[in-house]
Image: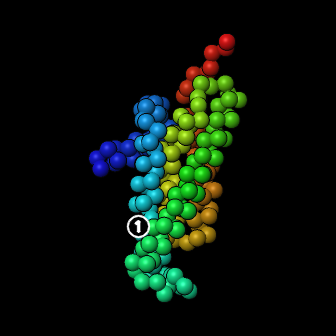
Amino acid sequence: MKHFFNRVWLCMQLPKKQVVFRLNRERIGVPFLYVGLLIAFVCIPLFVQTFIQSDGVIADLILPMFAVYFLFIYFPIFALSVFSLIAAVAAIALTVAKLADRKLTYLMLYKIAAFAATIPIIGYGVSLLISEEFAMIWIWASFLYLVAVLIRVIFHYPKARKK
């Protein structure tokens, strides 16, 4: 748990050069686990709010059935949308890196994008508790934030050598 909070602290300091290089040394599985844990923490208050405010067919479910629904339907869709957004931002950043002639790979940019998504994921969970309209605005602001952070990160790396 200590390592998780240390990583959160490091991610809050992005796009500092030392932090970028330190996070980029992580193995590829670490950002997936990190983002998964963040999504799980964000989903706990969403689970409670959805159960309390549900209506229709979902409101008729008892708590264990609702938990199964939430765990196997809502959580995977939410996680897939977060990982897809991170992948799209990493693809945009790779395009910018190629145009800027930097020595970066998609995997490196995906790792940094996953770590940079800390503030957007936590903010999205909070904004969903406020209102869905605000959450939609937050998604676009998060997308722009991630693109801006990755563009700054790209220029920390040296240009590719000419062959």
Under mark 1, the amino acid is Ile
Instruction: Tell me which residue sits at (66%, 41%) in the image.
Output: 92
Q: Position of residue 13 (x, y in %)?
A: 44, 41
Q: Is residue 70 placed above or below 55 in the rendered structure?
A: above
Number of numbered discs on residues: 1
In the displayed orientation, state which residue is furthest to the top: 163
Q: Is residue 105 placed above or below 90 in the rendered structure?
A: above
In the displayed orientation, state which residue is furthest to the right: 99
Q: Nearer the viewer, residue 158 or 30?
A: 30
Snapshot quadrant of residue 163: top right
Q: Position of residue 43 (x, y in %)?
A: 45, 65
Instruction: Tell me which residue sits at (42%, 83%) in the image.
Output: 62
Q: Position of residue 143 (x, y in %)?
A: 61, 51
Q: Position of residue 6 (x, y in %)?
A: 34, 44
Instruction: Tell me which residue sits at (55%, 36%) in the image.
Output: 107
- Residue underneath mark 1: 44
Answer whether residue 156 is visible to the viewer in this image.
Answer: yes
In the displayed orientation, state which residue is furthest to the left: 2
Q: What sort of colour scheme is used for the picture?
A: rainbow
Instruction: Tell me which residue sits at (58%, 57%) in the image.
Output: 81
In the displayed structure image, the side of residue 72 where residue 150 appears, left or right: right
Query: Which element carries disc 1, helix, strand or loop?
Result: helix
Answer whether residue 126 is visible to the viewer in this image.
Answer: no
Mark 1 surroundings: few (<14), some (14-19) or many (≥20) residues within 10 A: few
Q: Is residue 94 placed above or below 3 in the rendered structure?
A: above
In the displayed structure image, the side of residue 96 where residue 65 appears, left or right: left
